[in-house]
Amino acid sequence: MGKALFWVTIFIVVIFVTRLLAIQAAKKRRPPPQAPSNQTAAPAGSEEMVRCAHCGVHLPRSEASLLGQNTWCSPAHAKLGARDRDST
C-alpha cells in the first residue's frame, strides 16, 4: 500500500510541475498587453471625414472643397449648391 501511495504522489507532483511549466511557456509566447487606446484619438495616417453638402458622399477633409460653411466633393457640386435633405 505504501508503494502505491508513493507512486500516486510522484504522478501528481509530475503533472503539477508540467502544468506550471506549460503556463510559464504560454506567458512567454503571449505578447505583452497594450495600453488601452483613446477612442477619440485618430490612428496615424487617418484624417477626419466630411460630407458633401450636395450628394452626401463622405470623403477625407484634404480632398474636399471647403466653401463658406459647407464642404463639397467637387467644384461642380459646389456650383449646384446644397441639396435640401428634407425633400428626399
Image (tube, rainbow, N blue to C red):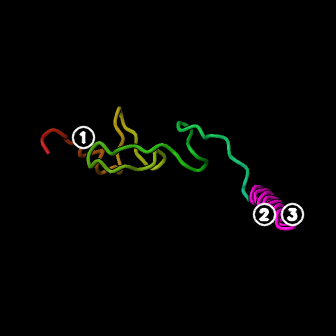
The quadrant in which the N terminus is found is bottom right
Q: Earlier in the sequence, mark 3 or mark 2?
A: 3
What's the CA distance linking mark 3 and mark 1?
92 Å
Going by the numbered disc 3, the residue's amino acid type is: Gly
Label 3 residue SS: helix
Residue topped by disc 1? 82
Going by the numbered disc 2, the residue's amino acid type is: Ile
Residue topped by disc 3? 2
What's the CA distance linking mark 3 and mark 2?
20 Å
What's the CA distance linking mark 1 and mark 2?
73 Å
Q: Residue furthest top?
A: 69
Label 2 residue SS: helix
56 in the magenta segment: no
Query: 13 and 83: which one is in front?
Result: 13
Residue topped by disc 2? 15
- Residue 6 vs 88, above or below: the answer is below
Q: Residue furthest front?
A: 1
Tell me where residue 53 appears, x and y as whole percent.
29, 42
- Residue 59 vs 86, above or below: the answer is below
Question: Nearer the viewer's eye, disc 3 or disc 1?
Answer: 3
Q: Residues within 10 Å of mark 2 (few under 14, many from 20)?
A: few
Secondary structure that dominates the magenta span: helix
Disc sitting over residue 65 in the figure: none
Tell me where residue 5 appears, x and y as whole percent.
82, 62
Tell me where residue 4 appears, x and y as whole percent.
82, 67
Name the residue rendered at 58%, 37% in the picture: 38
The quadrant where residue 35 appears: top right
14 in the magenta segment: yes
Name the residue rendered at 40%, 40% in the picture: 66
Please give the range of residues in magenta.
Answer: 1-27
Q: Residues within 10 Å of mark 1 (few under 14, many from 20)?
A: some
Name the residue rendered at 24%, 42% in the picture: 81
